[in-house]
């Protein structure tokens, strides 16, 4: 398949993406309710990596125990959601699609909320119960949608999947509201969690996110060629030897795992998978082999900036991260939709 002249991505551009991500990462560790000088922040991080004695600074526990694990989780969550969005937009050939289009994110939210309500947990791993329930419900959501799509349309067309995903999301959202209504003693925790927050993140959360992202990200990137072929249409892709149904199932299952893990740790954080691939595509072009690499860095950077805004905007009050991403994403969503209509005209 021929890639357009907008495919200008090169190694120097990747270095620029990486450099911006590192700068934003350090900035997010420095800033907060307590400002930490840049030199002190770099010294603490350097000594932590080298396992050297830390300087006598009051900010050491703030950096090592609070901000560093949080910013790591924010970056990894943003990278995961962005690569899911890029894969879904390529698979469905729709710039308005992202991982939550299938209803997987909403299903994972319901599973995690039920785990909170019924106190389901695993000894010595306090977040494992929520994660297990989120992943199970993400898979169940996927299976329900694919089964219905298969019954209605054997070819599993993208329009059928999107429509069923939207309907399923509305249905599960109503069930989630019902759960919140009857969970009177835990309403505050569930409501804040459903709006998205990574304020209580730990290094264990970061390790889980990193491992899952490495596995699922590798799978999605290995399908870059097939996703490029989808751009010319499913029938044309089938004619050049792309196993349409197998690729769809692999992408959908991998996306459901990634989203399930992200939702179980950070709650429902919307629009990252919609906004990031659209902005990055303007720089890298449509080639998924290059787009997905850039989305990993771009998504992490975007969510780190949103998290910093959530912490700093009304300091010392902290806004839910999902609220900030939704406010930004809603504006971008309208912009993308308006542009897509202009193109059709």
Image: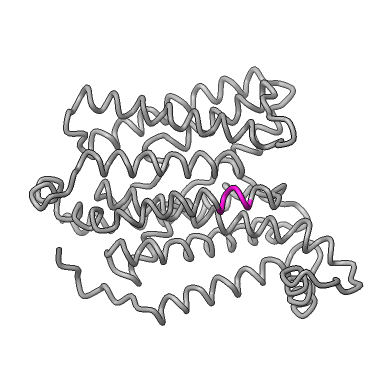
Asked if residue 285 is positioned above or below residue 307 in the image, the reply reads: below
The residue under the point 59% across, 61% down is 304
Is 198 in front, or is 203?
203
Is 160 in front, or is 247?
247
Total numbered badges shown on the rendered structure: 0
- Residue 89: % across, % down: 31, 51
In the image, is 68 to the left or to the right of 284?
A: right
In the image, is 81 to the left or to the right of 310?
A: left
Asked if residue 251 is positioned above or below residue 16 in the image, the reply reads: above
- Residue 154: % across, % down: 17, 28
Q: Quadrant of residue 316?
A: bottom right
Image quadrant for the N terminus?
A: bottom left
In the image, is 40 to the left or to the right of 6?
A: right
Magenta stretch contains residue 247: no
Main secondary structure found in the magenta portion: helix
Magenta span:
206-210
- Residue 283: % across, % down: 35, 72
The residue under the point 81% across, 72% down is 52
The residue under the point 29% across, 68% down is 285
């Amino acid at each position: 398949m021929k890639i357009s002249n907008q495919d200008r991505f090169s190694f120097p551009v990747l270095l620029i993406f990486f450099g911006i991500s590192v700068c934003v990462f350090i900035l997010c560790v420095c800033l907060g309710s307590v400002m930490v000088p840049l030199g002190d922040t770099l010294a603490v991080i350097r000594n932590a990596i080298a396992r050297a004695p830390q300087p006598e600074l009051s900010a050491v526990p703030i950096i090592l125990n609070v901000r560093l694990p949080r910013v790591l989780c924010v970056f990894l969550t943003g990278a995961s959601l962005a690569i899911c969005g890029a894969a879904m937009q390529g698979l469905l050939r729709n710039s308005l699609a992202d991982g939550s289009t299938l209803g997987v994110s909403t299903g994972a939210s319901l599973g995690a909320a039920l785990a909170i309500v019924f106190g389901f947990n695993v000894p010595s791993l306090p977040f494992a119960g929520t994660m297990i329930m989120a992943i199970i419900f993400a898979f169940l959501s996927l299976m329900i949608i694919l089964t219905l799509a298969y019954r209605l349309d054997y070819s599993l067309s993208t329009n059928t999947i999107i429509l069923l995903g939207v309907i399923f999301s509305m249905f599960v959202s109503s069930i989630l509201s019902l759960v919140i209504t009857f969970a009177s003693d835990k309403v505050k925790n569930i409501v804040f969690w459903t709006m998205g927050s990574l304020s209580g993140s730990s290094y264990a959360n970061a390790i889980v996110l990193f491992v899952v992202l490495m596995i699922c990200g590798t799978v999605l990137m290995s399908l870059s060629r097939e996703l490029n072929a989808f751009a010319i249409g499913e029938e044309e892709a089938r004619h050049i030897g792309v196993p349409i149904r197998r690729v769809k199932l692999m992408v959908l299952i991998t996306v459901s795992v990634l989203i399930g893990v992200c939702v179980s740790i950070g709650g429902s954080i919307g629009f990252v998978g919609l906004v990031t691939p659209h902005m990055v595509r303007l720089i890298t072009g449509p080639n998924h082999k290059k787009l997905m690499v850039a989305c990993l860095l771009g998504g992490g950077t975007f969510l780190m900036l949103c998290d910093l805004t959530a912490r700093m905007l009304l300091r010392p009050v902290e806004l839910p991260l999902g609220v900030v991403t939704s406010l930004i994403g809603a504006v971008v969503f309208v912009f993308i939709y308006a542009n897509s209509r202009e193109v059709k005209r």
